Amino acid sequence: EAQVTQNPRYLITVTGKKLTVTCSQNMNHEYMSWYRQDPGLGLRQIYYSMNVEVTDKGDVPEGYKVSRKEKRNFPLILESPSPNQTSLYFCASSARDSPTGELFFGEGSRLTVL
Amino acid sequence: SQQGEEDPQALSIQEGENATMNCSYKTSINNLQWYRQNSGRGLVHLILIRSNEREKHSGRLRVTLDTSKKSSSLLITASRAADTASYFCAPLRAGRRALTFGSGTRLQVQP
């Protein structure tokens, strides 16, 4: 089954404790992206990747890192999480090297930073 | 920001009625996509309309695009309780590589 898988789905952590949210897709997509969703603010793009070893900042990259060492994986790293990073995070992928086509989303990772 | 702005923010209708949601954007676009999100779940692509298209249909969905007014609408006909969800438009500006999303329209279909 074609899917984008995120882990963990739920996480409660404390300020400053490094964490990684993994994202994996099995559709051989070139394009992958991370979004955060906050009430009243919609979805905002954090980082995206056009292909392996190619990443770019989105609209709200501060406090986040990403890597794209393999085509299928695009982990989101929070080196020193802060409470303002409490949010619902989504990973998405697309079949082409630019998202002119359909984006496939994961089920989301709800992160709480205390 | 080139994100679309959906209107209304919330809409409540009875089952069987039609639901219309609108989207406005600010810049020239390559295409515009509509997505659906069930509460707390990932977004699901519904339909894409290109800048040179004016109307597109998919099942009970009808999307229109007016590039002169920089607006789009999504019509869901004969709505069902299962259509209850948030709906987002995502305009893609020519030359840009990323979709951006607004806050969506929350649709409640009463059985």
Image (cartoon, rainbow, N blue to C red):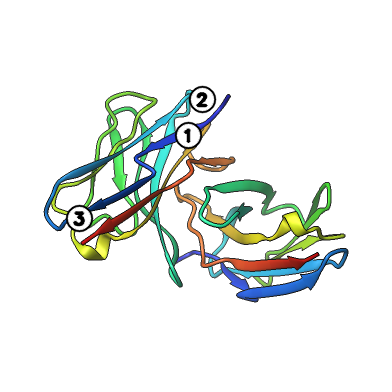
Q: Secondary structure at mark 2?
A: loop
Q: In the rendered image, which residue does mark 1 sit on?
A: A4
Q: In the rendered image, which residue does mark 2 sit on?
A: A27
Above or below, B35 relative to B73: above
Instruction: Measure the C-alpha gap from mark 3 to mark 1.
Output: 23 Å
Q: Is the C-beta separation of discs 3 and 2 under 8 Å?
A: no
Q: Residue at x 67, y 54 (%)?
A: B51
Camera-side residue: B8 or B95? B8
Work out whether residue B109 can be spotted: yes
Q: In the rendered image, which residue does mark 3 sit on?
A: A63
Q: Is residue A98 left or right of residue B63?
A: left
Place residue B55 in its image quadrant.
bottom right
Q: Is the C-beta separation of discs 3 and 1 under 8 Å?
A: no
Q: Is the C-beta separation of discs 1 and 2 under 8 Å?
A: yes
Q: Residue at x 68, y 72 (%)?
A: B69
Q: Is residue A75 left or right of residue B43?
A: left
The mark that comes first in sequence, 3 or 1, is 1
Q: Amino acid at mark 3?
A: Gly
Q: Residue at x 47, y 34 (%)?
A: A4
Chain of the residue under label 1 = A
Q: Tell which tag, 1 or 2, sits nearer the viewer.
A: 1
Q: Secondary structure at mark 3?
A: loop
Q: Residues within 10 Å of mark 3 (few under 14, many from 20)?
A: some
In the rendering, at what x and y percent does residue A65 appear? 22, 45
